[in-house]
Image (tube, rainbow, N blue to C red):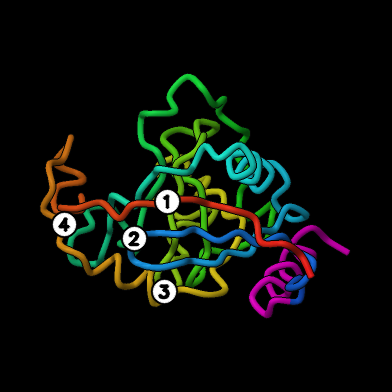
Amino acid sequence: MTRAAMALILAFALTNHVFAGDAPRIVMSTSEGDIEIELYPEQAPITAGNFLKLVDSSKLDGGSFYRVVTYDNDRGSPKIEVIQGGRGDSLEGEIEAIDHETTEQTGIRHTDGVISMARGGVGTATSEFFIVIGDQPGLDYGAPRNADQQGFAAFGKVVRGMEVVRRIQQLPANGPSDSDYTKGQILNDPVSIASVRRIAQE
């Protein structure tokens, strides 16, 4: 079987939750409600493994969703819709950057509800993440959103609480921005993430 065929099978399986029940789940308890996410360490061992390490060490507790991107406020191309969260600069120096796992490698595409790692250059992702709203192929490998066309590293999917994600995206976003690129995308009042915990497997 070719690598492309395997990637297609994995993508189908993930979209249809074939791995549900076997994959670890976590719950983000936010000030807007809980978001339950299924992670895929078999398909994205580096990225999902890094995220689970952050969860198990409670390093994501006290973080927030602070940035919302919509088709109306996005300045990238192609335009996307996501909410971004994490601990910002507070974990700088504590966490090493991880190797980049592309969507071509994992077969996990940026479809509605997928969680993925934020990054600058390739191999710079640490702890910041985003959740996709709607299907966003512009974030996948080979798309021109990034000049390097390596896309972002997806590693799981929301299985409960997408109404919370969408509600967060619609909150007022006129907060102070460090750049013109993110102007109009920073939440006036970040949504706090009180805790991120594993859910016991049945």
In the image, residue 129 above or below residue 138: above
Q: Which amino acid does the dot numbered 1 rest on?
A: Ala
Q: Position of residue 6 (x, y in %)?
A: 79, 64
Residue occupying image coordinates x 30% and y 62%: 79
Mark 1 Cα within 10 Å, few/some/many (few <14, many 20+)?
Answer: some
Q: Residues within 10 Å of mark 3 (few under 14, many from 20)?
A: some
Image quadrant containing the N terminus: bottom right
Please tell me which of labels 2 and 3 falls first in the chain: 2
Label 1 secondary element: strand
Say if the magenta span includes residue 14: yes
Q: Is residue 47 magenta?
A: no
- Residue bearing the label numbered 2: 31
Looking at the rendering, the stretch of residues picked out in magenta corresponds to 1-17
How many labels were placed on the picture?
A: 4
Of the residues tagged 1 and 4, which is closer to the observer?
1
Residue position marked by numbered label 1 in the rendering? 194
CB-based contact (under 8 Å), mark 1 and mark 2: yes
Picture layout, residue 9 above or below residue 82:
below
Relative to 44, is 71 above or below? below
Front-lying residue, 3 or 57: 57
Q: Residues within 10 Å of mark 4 (few under 14, many from 20)?
A: many
Residue, disc 3: 134
Type of secondary structure dominating the magenta stretch: helix
Residue at 54% from the left image edge and 68% from the top image edge: 158
Tell me the CA gap for discs 3 and 4: 20 Å
Closer mark to the observer between disc 2 and disc 3: 2
Q: Earlier in the sequence, mark 2 or mark 4?
A: 2
Residue that carries the numbered disc 4 in the rendered image? 173
Identified at 54% across, 26% down, the residue is: 95
Amino acid identity at mark 2 = Ser
Please determine whether, in this image, residue 175 is positioned above or below residue 34: above
Alpha-carbon span between mark 2 and mark 3: 23 Å
